[in-house]
Amino acid sequence: MVLGALADPTRQQVVQLLSQGPQRAGRLASASGASAPTMSRHLRVLLEAGIVADERPAQDARGRVFRLRPESIVAVQAWLDQLQAHGDEQLASFKRHVEGRGTT
């Protein structure tokens, strides 16, 4: 679900913007060039995937501030690290195989 949510370039841009700090939806929309309804849909996908969280400041109950949930990205990074380690092992194994064939 996280990778599916991050597959969209606009959502990737939102994550990049939120990595700089919490922001309101309107600011995210204008920074990414998306309309308010479009940004709302993107934020809903990111919320459902657990990538972002929203908060309502006490002084402005109407406004929502969105922030990145780093723990969701940590899970993706851990998975990518596992893939990288497996790929590295496959390449090392292939290298040993090729080098072994060259000596006979």
Image: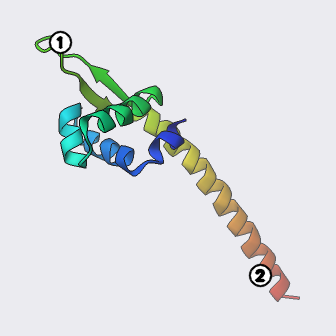
Residue at 69 percent of width and 61 percent of height: 89
Residue 97: image quadrant is bottom right
Depth check, front residue: 5 or 40: 40
Residue 64: image quadrant is top left
Residue 86 seen in the current view: yes
- The local secondary structure at tag 2 comes to helix
Depth check, front residue: 61 or 21: 61
Q: Quadrant of the C terminus?
A: bottom right
From the viewer's perspective, is residue 11 above or below residue 88? above
From the viewer's perspective, is residue 60 above or below residue 71? above
Q: Residues within 10 Å of mark 1 (few under 14, many from 20)?
A: few
Residue at 77 percent of width and 81 percent of height: 99
Q: Label 1, on which residue?
A: 61
Q: How far is the residue under mark 2 from the one under mark 1?
A: 66 Å
Q: Which mark is residue 99?
A: 2
- Residue 56: image location, x then y, percent: 22, 16
Q: Earlier in the sequence, mark 2 or mark 1?
A: 1
Residue at 84 percent of width and 83 percent of height: 101
Residue 24 seen in the current view: no
- The local secondary structure at tag 1 comes to loop
Q: Quadrant of the N terminus?
A: top right
Q: Which mark is residue 2?
A: none
- Residue 86: image location, x then y, percent: 67, 55
**What colour scheme governs how the chains and residues are painted in the rendered image of this protein?**
rainbow
Amino acid type, label 2? Glu
Q: In front of the other: label 2 or label 1?
A: 1
- Which residue reaches farthest left? 59
Amino acid type, label 1? Ala
- Residue 76: image location, x then y, percent: 51, 41
Residue at 23 percent of width and 40 percent of height: 29
